[in-house]
Image (tube, rainbow, N blue to C red):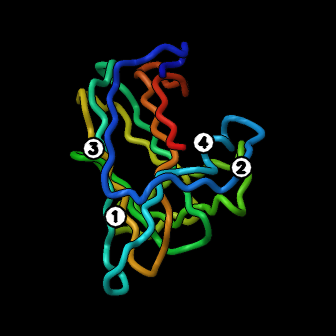
Amino acid sequence: TNSLGDLSGMTVEWSGFGGPWNGRSSATNGDENMMYAYLDNSTRGGAHGTPWPACIAVSNIPSSSYDLYVYFGAGGPGGYQTIGINGGKTYIYWPMSASTNSFPGNYRAATSIDGDATTNGANYAVWSNLTASSFNITHTVFQDVCNGGVAGVQVVPSPNKRRVGTEIIFR
């Protein structure tokens, strides 16, 4: 839905995720509602460190220019993960744990790109000034190292720069 509560016309498909994970049965506000559940990308076998990518494809973006926010979490402390979009940066981070962090007011952006030092305690990433009518998000965890997933996606029209726009929350 968009910021007015209307359907935006965007389409979303995902693959490679094990299904939804929910860290709480109830939430006290919208931030907790989003951040305590996610599309689970836990590892599914293989040698230690085997990457497990999962993909979210979003199309029919209604804005000609926008910023993309992707929110993510983990059920417990774990190792590093990566998140990226086609044609854009791939961020590397240690996720915040949904079982130990509170919301709102505890958002931390991933700032390290793959190959740099890892951002510690991140729970969202931003790609700015995008213009494509579609994109693919790739979230990767590593066998026996971590679990986690994508909690929500937000498309914010530019140059608006306010956190309103179209939201996709995975529950």
Tag shown at residue 136: 3
Query: How far apart, in angstroms, are the residues tagged by discs 2 and 4?
Result: 12 Å
**81 is higher (above) or lower (below) than 143:** above
**171 is higher (above) or lower (below) than 59:** below
| Residue contact between numbered discs 4 and 1, judged by CB atoms under 8 Å | no
Please name the residue that numbered disc 4 is placed on.
Answer: 34
The local secondary structure at tag 3 comes to strand
Name the kind of residue labelled 4 in the image: Met
Residue drawn at (47%, 64%), measured in percent from left and top?
93
Name the kind of residue labelled 3 in the image: Asn
Coordinates of residue 106 in the picture (x, y in percent): 68, 49
| Residue contact between numbered discs 2 and 4, judged by CB atoms under 8 Å | no
Tag shown at residue 19: none
Instruction: Mark 1 vs mark 2: give the one in front.
Output: 2
Mark nearer the N terminus (2 vs 3): 2
Coordinates of residue 168 in the picture (x, y in percent): 47, 34
Query: How far apart, in angstroms, are the residues tagged by discs 1 and 3?
Result: 17 Å
Name the kind of residue labelled 1 in the image: Asp
Query: How far apart, in angstroms, are the residues tagged by discs 4 and 1?
Result: 26 Å
Task: Characterize the local packing of mark 2: few (<14), some (14-19) or many (20 or more) Cα atoms within 10 angstroms.
Answer: few
| Residue contact between numbered discs 1 and 3, judged by CB atoms under 8 Å | no
| Residue contact between numbered discs 3 and 4, judged by CB atoms under 8 Å | no
Mark nearer the N terminus (1 vs 2): 2
Please name the residue that numbered disc 2 is placed on.
Answer: 25
The local secondary structure at tag 2 comes to loop
Task: Characterize the local packing of mark 4: few (<14), some (14-19) or many (20 or more) Cα atoms within 10 angstroms.
Answer: many
Coordinates of residue 124 in the picture (x, y in percent): 51, 49
Please name the residue that numbered disc 1 is placed on.
Answer: 114
Query: How far apart, in angstroms, are the residues tagged by discs 3 and 4?
Result: 20 Å
The local secondary structure at tag 4 comes to helix
Name the kind of residue labelled 2 in the image: Ser
Residue drawn at (35%, 19%), measured in percent from left and top?
9
